[in-house]
Image: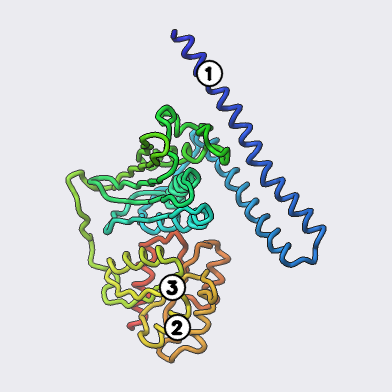
Amino acid sequence: MTADDATRTEAERAIALRDRFLAVVSHELRAPLATLLLWERALRDAPDDPELRTRALDAIRRCAELQARIVDDLLDVARAATGKLRVELQPVELAPVLTAAVQELRPAAASAGVHLLLQLEPLLPRIEADAHRLRQVISNLLSNAIKFTAAGGNVTLSVQRRRANVIITVRDTGRGIKAELLPHLFEPFSQDESSSGEGMGLGLAIARQLVELHGGTIRAQSDGPRTGASFVVSLPVPGRTGAETTDVPSAPPKLAGLRVLLVDDHREMLDALAHLLRAAGATVECVESAAAAWQTIATKPPDVLVTDLAMPVEDGYALLRRIRSEGPSHARALPAVALSAHTTTAERTRSLAAGFDAHVGKPVDLERLLDTLAKLGRRRIA
């Protein structure tokens, strides 16, 4: 094949990919729009049916969220193509970011009958990263793995330290990847033609762009069809040399002697935060509900309460109201920190007005949380 033939073949392939992508985009945008219009018609036909109203509103919300993600992906690809895709790097703890990504995808995995697992190595180093964008990378990789894994299969997110890098791996037991597709997997608009047709094939392209902006690398591995696949992200650890193999605390524990009651209905988030707070010197009691927190406060009052706001049955707001109005005298002034995935100014203002001493968003900025707890702990002891 001559150079001209090769150039022509590559151009034809690019055109075919573009045309296929445009067809997929059209489908992906029209499908939720069609669903929205159908549910709107259903609501008009039966405006007094409460069960139908609930189903319709849930479906409308899902369709709107799906379209928002599609638009975000398209904008990210456009920014990457023009060199305008940016990340804001700052010190980040990996465990909360990875845990949040797993929690986000757990409902999708459960709906597909896929087991979603998280494996965290202890004493992970902090890295320079954009927490939001890093979570986007992991979410894209997990979504892709769930999509191509049959019911009963496993998707595992693991992370470990290797000298001057952290290695994040998403491994699945799904359909695997053909050898000829591997070199093109991270190209925009590229999709496995054997896929179900869902999605635009942008997630992996965006993931690669974001990983490279973090100074890292990403690669895919598979032994072929029906063998599963692995996506491996390598990110640098700042200020380390390759000869270092352990992490040594640079300062005394910030929370030495502080007793913290940690309340969250998500077990993985609870375990990760408890591990990090204990590493900072705190004594941590973990419970998964407001009811269990109430019992703990009555028998073993902590120095500081840290509670998620969005919990079933009784949320963080209700728990704090109960403590302030009905709790034992020694607990009514208990310092309290609100944890919430809603990081708007309005949500922060609401939590502070409700009596919380501080509001910390998810993914958790660990240094901010540690500083907040240390300050509240000193106030409590004083």
Circles 2, 3 touching at the beta carbon (< 8 Å)? no
Q: Which residue is drawn at 39% across and 46% down?
A: 170
Q: Mark 3 points at which residue?
A: 288
Residue 175, image x, y percentages: 44, 40
Q: Distance between the residues labelled 2 and 3?
A: 11 Å
In this rendering, which labeled residue sits more in front, label 3 or label 1? Answer: 3
| Quadrant in which residue 251 is drawn | bottom left
Outermost residue toward the bottom in this view = 329
| Residue lying at 37% horizontally and 74% vertically, measured from the top left | 286
Disc 3 marks a residue whose amino acid type is Glu
In front: 242, or 91? Answer: 242
Chain-order first, disc 2 or disc 3 = 3
Locate residue 224, reporting x and y percent. 39, 34
Instruction: Place residue 367 in its image quadrant.
Output: bottom left
Residue for badge 2: 294
Say the numbered circle drawn on residue 11: 1
Helix, strand or loop at disc 2? helix
In the rendered structure, which disc, 1 or 2, sits on the residue that comes first in sequence? Answer: 1
Number of residues whose C-alpha sits closer than 10 Å to that of mark 2, classed few (under 14), some (14–19) or many (20 or more): some
Relative placement, left or right, of 279 versus 111 is left
Between marks 2 and 3 in the image, the one whose residue lies nearer the viewer: 3
Residue type at tag 1: Ala
Comes first in the chain, label 3 or label 1: 1
Is 348 displayed left or right of 297 in the figure? right
- For the residue marked with disc 2, what is the amino acid? Trp
Where disc 3 sits, the SS reads: loop
Residue 19 seen in this snapshot: yes
> Judging from the image, what secondary structure is the residue with disc 1 in?
helix
